[in-house]
Image: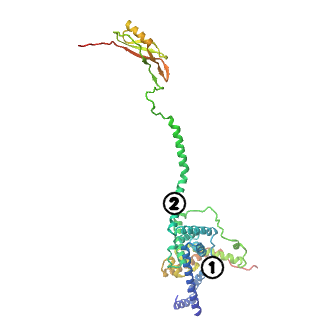
Amino acid sequence: MAGEERARVAEHLATCRECAAHFDQLSELRRDLVTLPLAPVPARLRTQLQVLASRERARWNSTKTLPLAMRTLSINLKLAVDNLMRPLAVPLAGGLASALLLFGLVVPTLGFRPAVRNDVPTVLYTAATLVEVSPVGVGNDEAVVELHIDAKGQATDYSVQQGEVSPALQADLNQLMFFSRFTPATWFGQPTNGKVLVSFRRVRYVVRG
Amino acid sequence: MATSILDLNSQKHAEAATEFEDLALVRALREGSEQAYECLLLRFQQPVYNLALRLLNDPSDAADVVQEVFLKIFRNVMHFRGQSSLKTWIFRITINEAHNQRRWFFRHRHREVGIEEEQEDCRSRADILADGGQSPFDYVFDQEKQALIEAALARINPTFRAAVVLRDITDLSYEEIAEILQVSLGTVKSRILRGREALRQELEKRLQSRPGLRLMPKTAE
């Protein structure tokens, strides 16, 4: 306040009891505010500030020049990659190892096409077959005969399926049964009884001209 | 008259010395000197903490604010152009951070209830030793008065509170306060005046509602 204004206020305060009281209260309040004690900085905060200062100083010193900044950047990058990969390393290695183990266990049980061609399947029924036929005479009869082949590959019986068996055909049939070689039928790889159909047909020779 | 001129000259010298000291400190901080960091903490951690505490009225919030303030100082000291004094710049950061903290508090934490006991014991052994300077009555009286003033201070408008704290507790000039709060000189004076009046009314209200606390010294018969 300027000198004149200050004097006018002082003069008013001297005459007005209410304003003087108000002024006194405010002055006392100011004095009380000035004398409020300083709150001490907590010890923990002091330590935290020192740590903060140390960290920030190190950060600032590490970025002052370009080579230092590049070096810090590379270190930080490496650290970030390490931090990223480290938690993944064990699960990744474990996952890979368990996948290999499971694959190794499962693959042999999978059914693949056999590499050897014409292999005889052992899990199914295979019919008896004629391996070598004995020499038979040439007759005029026609018939279809079913031969019964035992587990040893020998013909044990026959039944006529079509046509009639004449004595000449009977002789041929006997010769065929005794002197031909058969492979027995198999059931799950084991020889068993089977049947073979044999057809006798008349051979015609037509000479023209 | 001669005394006042001498006072003015010494004040100017002190201001120039402080300014020189501030510039040297800022230069050392930019160079990354360890001593400069320590010196900055030693000079400003107490006033910054006190200002934050008076503005927020909560020791843990004040501690958070102080850390934020020093983090900003360390990270932005290279941008300090010296247009204001270092103290003004730091106090402006403190005021802004306290304002942000208060806004954050009202948004997020005003419904929180602490279940931990206050473990921060700031008192040293010297504080709890017997003190022959003050009688127990005076001590209790002063404590109660301070508690009343602090409670009243916490209840007034934060805008006025900042101005009163900066002027009457931190003892800054009107010009410095105007620079810190980034308002005009007239606004500063107005805020201080209204703040003091609000504080006086608040104290009056509290004292009237608690007549039992008016202790009167009495001689034992």
Residue wearing tag 2: A77
Residue type, label 1 = Thr
Would you say A71 lies left or right of A201 here? Answer: right
Callout 1: 10 Å neighbours few (<14), some, many (20+)?
Answer: few
Would you say A138 lies left or right of B73 here? Answer: left
Foreground mark, 2 or 1?
A: 2
Mark 2 and mark 1 lie on one chain; the one further toward the N terminus is 1
Which image quarter holds the C terminus of chain B? bottom right
Q: At which x and y percent is residue A186?
A: 47, 21
Which element type, helix, strand or loop, lies under badge 2? Answer: helix
Q: At which x and y percent is residue A94?
A: 55, 46
Q: Residue at x 53, y 48 (%)?
A: A92
| Residue extending farthest bottom | B1
Q: CA distance from mark 2 to mark 1?
A: 53 Å
Q: Residue at x 50, y 37 (%)?
A: A107
Residue wearing tag 1: A35
